[in-house]
Amino acid sequence: MNYPIWLIPALPLLGFLLNGLASLLYGAAQAQKRGEEWRKAHPDEGHGHDHGSHEAAHGAHDSHDAHGHDHGHHDTGPMLPWALRLFHGVVGVGTVGLATVLSFGILVPYAKSVMSNVEGARPIVETLYHWIQVGGLSIDIAFRIDALSALMLSFVTFVGTLIHLYSVGYMQAEAGYGRFFAYLNLFMFSMLMLVLANNLPMLFIGWEGVGLCSYLLIGYYYDKDFAAAAGKKAFVTNRVGDFGMVLGIFGILALFGTTDFSFVDMARQQQMASGTPLGVYAVCALLFLGACGKSAQVPLYVWLPDAMAGPTPVSALIHAATMVTAGVYLVARCSAVFLLAPDALTLVAWVGAGTAILAASIGLAQNDIKKVLAYSTVSQLGYMFLACGVGAFAIGMFHVFTHAFFKACLFLGSGSVIHALHHEQDMRAMGGLAKKTPATHLTMLVSALAIAGIVPFAGFFSKDQILGSAFAGGHYILFAVGLVTAGMTAFYMFRLYRMTFSGTYRGTPEQESHIHESPLTMTVPLWILGAGSVLTGFLGLPEVFGKNLMVEFLSPSVGKMHAHEVSHATEYLLMAVSLAVAGAGIFLAFKWYTGQDAKFTPGAAPEDIIASPAAHAFFEKTGTLGKVVANKWNVDEGIEALVLSPFRKIGTFLWRGFDALFIDGLVNASAFMVELTGDLVRFFTTGNVRNYALTFVLGVLGFTLYIWMR
Amino acid sequence: MNAVEPMAVAPAAYLTVGTLLFFIGMAGALLKRNALSIFLSIELMMNAANLLLLTYARMRGDISGQVIVFFVIAIAAAEASIGLAMFVALFRARSTVDVDKINLLKW
Amino acid sequence: MNTETIVFALASALAIVFSLVMLFQRKPVKSVLSLVVTFFGLAILSVLLAAPFIAALQVIVYAGAILVLFLFVIMLLNLEQEAADKETRKIHFYLGILAVLGLGGLVTGLTLRAGNPPVPVGNGPFLIPAKDEIPLLGKVLFTDYLLAFEALSVLLLLAAVGALILSKRRFE
Amino acid sequence: MSPELFNVAAAGAKIAFVWGVVLAALLPMLIWAERRVAAFIQDRPGPNRVGPLGLFQSLADAIKFFMKEDVTPTYADRFLFNLAPWITLVPAITTFAIIPFGSSLPVTLGGQTYDVPLIIADVNVGVLYMFALTSIGIYGIVLAGYTSNDKFSLLGGIRSSAQIISYELAMGISAIGVFMTAGSLRLPEVVAYQQQHIWNVVPQILGAVIFIISAFAETNRLPFDLPEAEAELVAGYHTEYSAFKFAMFFMGEYANMVAASALIVTLYFGGWSLPGIAFTGVAGALLSIAVFAAKTGLFIFIFLWVRWTLPRFRYDQLMDLGWKVFLPLSVLNLLYVAILVAAGKA
């Protein structure tokens, strides 16, 4: 059967080209128009400034602000004409939507065929052409759909389309509307390349592509320093991971002689072309380093919270639902290789668990609504790696799947809140939004319950199975860490919920009057994602409830560690424990964060306003530790002191000492030698042709003499 | 197709004449100061080389030598036209063709 | 002593004597005319070497065109006499003579020492035919050496254009 | 009598015959004819006092030339000045060596019959030999102009040599067409080809016209006699020459004219042949000589006719004609002949 798989990434690419082109053309036209206006306003230069025209220009600008009850805050220019916005919206959403339809057209029959015959499931591979051919190495431009990429493809396209739709409403007042959709489409293209790639180099194209788009979109408000810096930070941090990724690809090539994903099967059958256990371990570690960079694991997670400088749909799509899960996808994809090196898996598990609890603990004390979600994302990614690390790759992917829905929903909900509050992100200035924004409130509550792990929402099933796998594998410490993290998760999510939706509004009444529910383009995706947060969990019911569809579906693609069976009783017990812990967290959040009758006064201590006396007592007891946690464990400062500062010093030394003195010295010395030689030799340059001729003949004479003598 | 009959005069005689002419030309090229005379001497050198080529072609019974002489003559024509045009331009600019007085190409 | 030897001796003597005249003659016009005579000698030698076509070409192109151009230039520039002042660079003069004599001796010696080439006469596709070599010359020129021939025609065209541009007075 | 000896003797006889006819009979006749034709065209009697119809006028002129004072300009380069007329005359006469002036003459000597081809030297480079000699002839004119130490002479010399070099191109290229059809540079084979097929003038009329007009320029005849253009340059390159040296230039010009006519006949008008007649035996040989002489005479007459009919070109017109009209046309002719030959082969 011939599937037009290549169309799936090609459509967003087309969208990117169209949107980008339209945006550029419009920008050029605007620049020209502005120039003409300026010339018109300044018919004779040198006559000073014409105040009238200036005011007229301002007036035009202001009218936009007054007209739009929207994001004047980030306005970097006048709003686009409605026709152009319609074009960008239609192209942006349309291409991605078409890709989604197309991919589901391929996915649904494929999933059916896989489920009917799991053992005999074959991936669909579509080879377009040979990209690189050197010796025995052949790298093709080829697309692959197997269970793993099918799973990824399903939620990437689905959630992606919803977020595109959401963006139509969310971004409508932005000047860079076209640019935004161009980048977003380019991101979809890269992500689909990453997911559909049939070999590591192609995956790497997508990998770098999403990195680039992440950079571009974090720095979307490029005129804001913090956004530009955040984009740079994300990019540089990812480079550290990519360095490992590239070396890992070379390692795979060295081990298996191919970068095609067929190496997974080779690894499964332990048919390595070469390599030692140590080599396999190194390759796994390097690939995992890449995954750490992209999926924000310790110690490379620092970029993700800062990435919240981008527009909220970007945070939802890239920094929660899709791109950051690429690391998990990579590990799951190479699961067979990881299984050859159990030590590497242990590393993955411990890093994942460490990240989960570290990020969760930071999330406890954040006041920015998006920062909370960002740390939550890091923490949840840690969970996924924890799952992979204990050998439950399918469960990890399941969590990726469910997480995509509820985290996207949470982010979009927070976006809706921010939208409603005119770009207010500090939760201390919120409160009482439940009635004002009912749709947002309800969907966010559902997804918060999902992430907290309350039955029967999606997060419960995935998270519980992760903990169960850890327990079953005998990793009790990891289990404990996960359990604590689950409690923390429940606590900070409902802290967020309470601070945002409960109680009364803590801003000024004037602001309060502007609060409004978001338009349909934004709420519809919220509803759909909210529904997903409820329903997706049932795709992966634990074994005790029957067949785990997800695990079975993924079994042809991902490896699985030898399963340690636990009794049903233990499983029920574990569920009860995790439910209890989550419930405790929610209870504590409700108890501590009353949010009643408080007004936001700038300068007041953060928790004074909204936290209950019991909470204050706790904070005072924990004292220093609390401050450290609130300051994100001082990780950024630590990196600055331990890594960046020494590197800067080495760099300075290399610059001043090595480059300027040694290298430049060598270069200058050679230049000086040339100059000296030239000074000596130029005496022979008489400008007299006959001298040259004579010299030439004498040379020939010498040469002839040599021949004669020989 | 049969080769030409054996040479009545020893090839070495032709070679000697050619070499002699070549070095007479070289002497002119090195010692004369008039650019035109130098050019003339170079033409003589070229023709001496042609003679050698023809001699070797005759010795081997191979016509390729004659072909190469043909090319040399044609290239000499091109070279002479350009060279003489240069001399005319040079003379217009500096009113002399004494190469010792034309020595701008120095430091 | 047969006819060919006599002709060879006469032609060689002509060429060498008049090349020496060319060398020592101070008047450019006479230098050129001596060279014409030298080329005649060379043309005769070419005929002896079974290359009458080349001989004709040599007379037409060298004597008939190139050296006439020389004469033209001499007449146009009115170069009556070479610079009469004596050679100022004695070292250059002696070194030049030394180089010419040394190199000439060496090369002559090398040439004679090398003797006849080991390639036997009478094989190969380019065998000079006994009576009329021109058809073969034409054939070889337009088959094996076609590229060189075409390149040469381009070169000649360029030379014509170049000469025109170089010698054109700029009136504007 | 050995064949070698016979060949030498035959060659000597042929040289004697050709030079005798050309130098001793034809040239004086031609000078007389020129003046008579001129007079006829200009409707006047012309020289008619010395001998019957003034036939001995040339003889009288010759005596006059020998008797006149031979003047050499004071600052002229004496050696080169004296050399110049010789350089003009000798190549002009030598040209005849390669022109076949008849079919072959059977000679029976000592019971052995030799077939003597009526050509002095059948060299395989054929007409190239003639072009080579023509280019040598230029030196005579250049030197005459240069060494006379006279502005008129110099101008005439430069004009003449430039003119000859320029028209040699068109002439040579149009002649190539003839050799392409004949497949050889040898003039006897050119004649043989025309005898078997058709006179070259028929298929190659363009080449023939170019060749003939260029021949006028090559021989410095009107309407292309710019080098001597008496109205502007007094007498061009031979302004300073007098007496016998002048006579040599004079003879050289007429010899060139005869040679050019003979060459035109040979290349384009069948040489000594006539269509449909086989020239065999002694009678045939003599007849062929007569045919050749008649054809050549016709062209000599045309030379004279043109001279006394057409006005002189301006020098720039002459050069324009040579470079911008004849050269491209001759190349066109070459292309056309090439297509003809290729079509004939195919």
Image: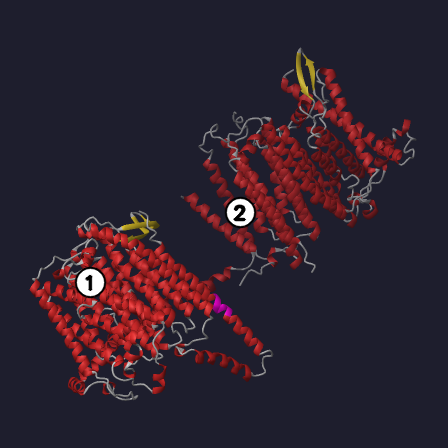
- Chain letter behind tag 2: C
**Residue B72 position in % (x across, y down):** 56, 41
**Residue A362 position in % (x across, y down):** 22, 77
Q: At x 21% / y 81%, what residue is drawn?
A: A628
Span highlighted in magenta in the image: A25-29
Quarter of the image that includes the N terminus of chain D:
top right
**Residue A426 position in % (x across, y down):** 30, 81
Horizontal relation, residue A553 to residue A694: left or right: left
Q: Is residue A27 magenta?
A: yes
Q: Disc 2 marks which residue?
A: C100
Query: At numbered mark 1, what does the secondary structure look like: helix, strand or loop?
Result: helix
- Residue A425 showing in the rendered view: yes
Q: Disc 1 marks which residue?
A: A538
Query: At numbered mark 2, what does the secondary structure look like: helix, strand or loop?
Result: helix
Quarter of the image that includes the C terminus of chain D:
top right
Q: In the rendered view, tell whether residue A547 sits above or below residue A403.
A: above
Alpha carbon separation for disc pair 2 and 1: 103 Å
**Camera-side residue of B13 and A498:** A498
**Residue A539 position in % (x across, y down):** 20, 61
**Camera-side residue of A464 and A514:** A514
What's the residue type where badge 1 is placed? Phe
Q: At x 21% / y 83%, what residue is drawn?
A: A593
**Camera-side residue of A578 and D53:** A578
Q: In the rendered view, tell whether residue C163 sits above or below residue D176.
A: below
